[in-house]
Image: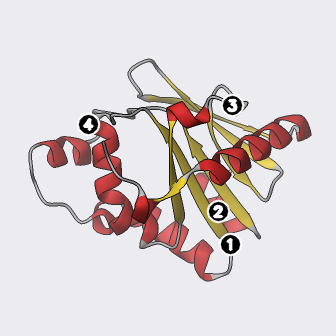
Amino acid sequence: MTRTPTFEELFRDCRRTAVHLETRDAYMKSDLAFIDWKAGRTLDPAERWADWHAIVTEATARGVEVRRARIVSTPVSEYIRFEHAVTDGLNIAAGEDVRWLSRRRATVVALPGNDFWLFDSSLVLLNHFDGDGENMEMELTEDPEVAKLCESAFEAVWARATPHAEFELS
């Protein structure tokens, strides 16, 4: 049986593009950073998620284009407000390009049933969450049809989405 690569290895082996589509209005509300943010505590996202920041910074420094699109309900949830608040200090600071799309504007897009990462248009990491947004497992596939669906969905969302700096929370 082949060993599944770690997330760090997937980024290290990525050569051109890494795209991520998020479609939930809440993730892991048990995350201590979210709990701290809700309590009004100041946090430095790049410090709080130092490993993540380092992985993405290294990839973007060597020329990998990292893009993240988030489909969100509006008005946005408390968790999405948290994500928006930490995006500049984490995702943008690491070199990611981030866009937001109101779920209402996503109706015309055929979407996969799960959030995903797509590496170099061919390797898909599917994220499975429970009903409360807690991470359950990840599934890796090189199925060309799945990769094609994910790439098509991501690009359709990306074309309709608003850049992070212009997205207004409502």
Residue beneath the point at 51% across and 55% down: 162
**Mark 2: few, some, or many residues within 10 Å (few <14, many ≥20)?**
many
Q: Residue furthest left?
A: 40
- CA separation in Å, label 1 and label 4: 31 Å
Q: Which residue is mark 2?
A: 11
Q: Does residue 70 appear left or right of residue 160 in this picture?
A: left
**Amino acid tagged 3:** Val
- With respect to residue 132, does 16 lie above or below? below
Q: Which residue is mark 4?
A: 78
Q: Which residue is mark 1?
A: 64
Q: Looking at this view, is 75 or 93 the one in front?
A: 75
Q: Does residue 30 appear left or right of residue 60 in this picture?
A: left
Looking at the rendering, in which quadrant would you find the C terminus?
top left
Q: Secondary structure at mark 4?
A: helix
**Amino acid tagged 2:** Phe
**Mark 4: few, some, or many residues within 10 Å (few <14, many ≥20)?**
some
Q: Quadrant of residue 109?
A: top right
Marks 4 and 2 close (CB-CB < 8 Å): no
Q: In the rendered structure, find residue 108 and report the number of the disc placed on it.
A: 3
